[in-house]
Image: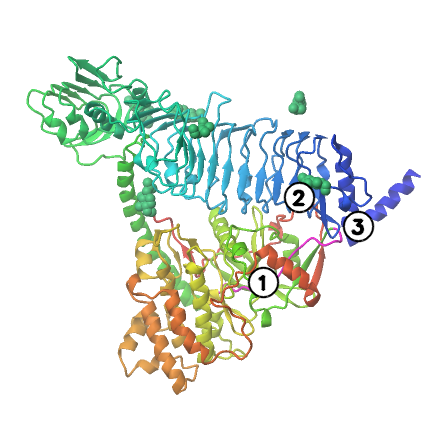
Amino acid sequence: MGFGVSYVLHLLLLFCTIFGCAWSQDGDVMQKLKASIKSSRSLDWSDSDYCKWENVTCSESRVTRIELQSHSLTGSLPKELVQLTALTDFYCSENNLHGDFPNMPNSLQNLYIYKNNFTSMPSDFFDNMSNLLVVSIGDNSFTQWEIPISIKKCLALKTFSANNASFVGEIPEIFGKENFPSLVTLQLSYNYLEGNLPNSLAGTSIETLWVNGQDKSTNRLNGTLSVIEKMTSLKQLWVNVNSFTGPIPDLSNLTQLTDVCFRDNRLTGVVPPTLTSLPSLKVVNLTNNQLQGSPPKFQNGVSVDNDLSGTNSFCTEGAGQPCSPLVNALLSVVEPLGYPYILAQTWKGNDPCGGNTWKGVVCSGGNISIIDFRNLGFSGSVSPSFASLSSVTKLLLSNNNLTGTIPNELANMPALKEIDVSNNSLYGQIPKFRGDVVVNTDGNPDIGHDKPSSPPSPSSGGNDKKKFSVGAIVGVVIGVVCLLGVGVLVFVMCRRRYNKRNGKVQTPNAIVIHPRHSGDGNAVKISVAAAGGSHAGGVGGTSGFSQSSSVQNVEAGNMMISIQVLREVTNNFSEKNILGKGGFGTVYKGELDDGTKIAVKRMQSDMGGDKGLNEFKSEIAVLTKVRHRHLVALLGYCLDDNEKLLVYEYMPQGTLSEHLFDRKDDGVKPLEWKRRLSIALDVARGVEYLHGLAQQIFIHRDLKPSNILLGDDMRAKVSDFGLVRLAPEGQASFETRLAGTFGYLAPEYAVTGRVTTKVDVYSYGVILMEMITGRRAIDNSQPDENIHLVTWFRRMQLNKDSFQKIIDPAMDIDEEGLESFRTIAGLASHCCAREPHQRPDMGHVVNALAPLVEVWKPSEPDAEDMYGIDLDMSLPQALSKWQNMEGQSTTLDVSYSSMIPSCENTQSSIPPRSPGFADSFTSADAR
Ligand SMILES: *[C@@H]1O[C@H](CO)[C@@H](O)[C@H](O)[C@H]1NC(C)=O
Ligand SMILES: *[C@@H]1O[C@H](CO)[C@@H](O)[C@H](O)[C@H]1NC(C)=O
Ligand SMILES: *[C@@H]1O[C@H](CO)[C@@H](O)[C@H](O)[C@H]1NC(C)=O
Ligand SMILES: *[C@@H]1O[C@H](CO)[C@@H](O)[C@H](O)[C@H]1NC(C)=O
Ligand SMILES: *[C@@H]1O[C@H](CO)[C@@H](O)[C@H](O)[C@H]1NC(C)=O
Ligand SMILES: *[C@@H]1O[C@H](CO)[C@@H](O)[C@H](O)[C@H]1NC(C)=O
């Protein structure tokens, strides 16, 4: 009997393995879940079909959502939940579930488990969860753990909320914009965190940051709040109940900040006007710090905590009332020391020589006679404001870590008898003190020299600004020198390489895939739309126009594709399937059963870890934010420690480069002039969109013919977004590490590393020149003076006689064509103007090209909208559209076991690759 049952079960299992049995699989798991939890409220889970259970949602018999929040549940969760591989939403918050929280399937997007009694999460929980958008795990009884580093793989994460989640240790440097381009909410209140706020928070898109209340242990968060200055998206900032020190930073760039809570820290210094006058501010709390100066007066309508004075060290009690000149003088003396806490504690009231004893200040006859800052561990510089303390006879600053010079103003202090600055790190000339002043400068190794022999030790004080600028200048100088060095080296290597292989490097692309959990078990269904042809718009489609969905944050949900599927369709990444190689990886053609082709870009795994990862993330972040008919669309990706793969639609005609320069004798005909014009317009429209129509400014940085792909209708799309940078909001130019391709680099970018949209305009101009002449940007087969296309082109253009000789001999141009030819040649030169401001913007280029192309508008109907934008769908929407169109498209089923992590390491099967250095390069950070 027992034998019989197990035999049948085995058969069933075998059957399921072969044919897939989602129904039975999800059914088993749901029964396990049902058995392990109890609800004291009614929860109707009686139907034999679990898809009809209350608060359970299915799609094609697969469980996609389980919503059990606030159901008075007790019990624990079964390990088998990980097998619900179509699950996107799991909500069980506000119950009394206990035990270890289990692993979840990597299809999961939204996880809400706060307010339970779970005792742990698996240490590898976040390892493969790259579809997560929201994680909310606070208020559980976890045993102490550190913030798991592996959440940095959750590329699409928007919210990470873990208040009262028993985190210990420091906040790791992972919450930067490289890892989390879309992170908006970071909540880490009421944990046991210690150490400083990570510097990587600078420049992030975080709007809500809670790190308040690390008050359950002796260690709290400490250090200064200076990183906040650069968190310009912040709306709500709660840092209360910690041990932060130093002054409130300059908040002038936090133009959306409405709610800020600084109370219960060790903040010192004068409340900056950038806070009191911040227009967006609505709520501010400052109580229980050692803030100094005049009590701040906020604008009408701002709620301030009512016990503002509390334990603060303001000089008066009335908001906005000024401090005495002596107090102001003392405050400016300690400003470059970062307003030391030890002084702020006792510096209360408006009279340093009144009742209280001010640390470091000795009075005599109602006037300050001695400043005694010896042995206080101060860092920072010596303020010239000491000179305004005219009654001081002794200035004692010895045995600190002071840097900078002794200000000349100090020599004018009328009553000064003694100055002791011994045992610091001061340098420079000693001011000419009067003969009767005793001056002690011993123990300052660099005193008397112009510059310190070694860089000053880092300071935590308010002197940061000054040092920073010195550091920055040194950094820039070193950076430029290195850059030039690397540049020359790279240039030499590139030229060698060009000579060797005639510059044939492409990053082709082609797209069209889409994986999805189908109704039958462990199978993944890939629906493949006919590539090219009428679908040249990729998944963009042309229906509707809902701006809101497309330009939002990364919506990478459902985009993860398993390595097994990609391996299957590319013959295990066979050499034979290589479409091309670029600086960041190899592109493989995928061949489906019915012969439909797709393209899979496999990022080079030997590209020094993080850099490759950054290009990968950049590409995903950009492509999920922008959608346009003339930008290649991303359909999916696969991420693992060793594997980074991107899947695009297939562009059957390959790269523009192949059509201009690399024509094989057989087949490919040279492009006619009309075609070139229409390609030029397509590219211009794609780039115009990147530059601003997408609401944010994206800069491509690597435009070139090998990054322009052609469909069967010869319409073009821009590809390869690995180097794209998002311009910081409201900023037209910004510094970045140099990256791009020689021949296409705008001169100012190559020299300064500052990038603007005009950098792309320059590269675009070079491409126009290439299309006109059929010559490469850098053509080593030419005599030396003609190698550089832009230089040669300009020279030829000046000479009316030779002008027509620049036309690509491979094409015939008639009279009519010649007219447009002159216009385009002029436009190309204009785009390559030496000064960025002399170059047109892409909108202008589109306007110049459009009328010329209209003349030869392709005969096939063109559903282009006003800007040629396909803002209509987010990627998940587009993908489900393809699903629905499945009937008209080809489908392929690939079975695989859902139990195998979807991005399994396939190192052993990777064909050996040369450590190639292709036509893209990046140099060390210029700063
Ligand atoms: C659960 O289902 C019940 C009945 O359909 C519904 O009233 C309730 O809102 C659902 N709860 C959640 C959290 O979805
Ligand atoms: C949480 O679980 C622990 C044991 O795991 C138990 O002692 C405690 O009472 C539970 N708390 C609640 C609120 O149920
Ligand atoms: C800040 O906290 C860390 C970790 O608790 C500690 O090692 C360090 O000494 C603290 N720094 C200051 C200045 O208190
Ligand atoms: C604010 O932004 C401007 C412009 O980007 C910049 O020059 C300035 O340094 C920023 N201020 C701070 C305090 O970071
Ligand atoms: C901050 O101040 C506001 C306004 O007085 C008050 O309503 C709020 O409770 C305070 N918050 C904290 C955390 O103290
Ligand atoms: C100066 O700084 C160093 C390290 O930053 C520290 O070890 C030393 O104690 C400091 N000296 C004084 C006098 O505070």
- Colour option used: rainbow
**Residue of label 2:** 105
Q: Earlier in the sequence, mark 3 or mark 2?
A: 3
Q: Give me the residue at 41% from left, 44% from top.
A: 203
Q: How crowded is mark 2: few (under 14 residues within 10 Å), some or many (20 or more)?
A: many
Q: Distance between the residues labelled 1 and 2?
A: 26 Å
Whole-percent x, y for residue 909 in the image: 62, 53
**Residue of label 3:** 16
**Residue of label 1:** 539
The quadrant in which residue 97 appears is top right
> What predominant SS class does the magenta segment belong to?
loop
**Furthest residue to the left?**
435
Please, what is the three-letter code of the amino acid marked with disc 2? Pro
Q: How far apart are marks 3 and 2 (CA)?
A: 19 Å
Q: What stretch is highlighted in magenta?
A: 503-521
Ligand 6 location (quadrant): top left
In magenta segment, residue 512: yes
Q: How far apart are marks 3 and 1 (CA)?
A: 33 Å
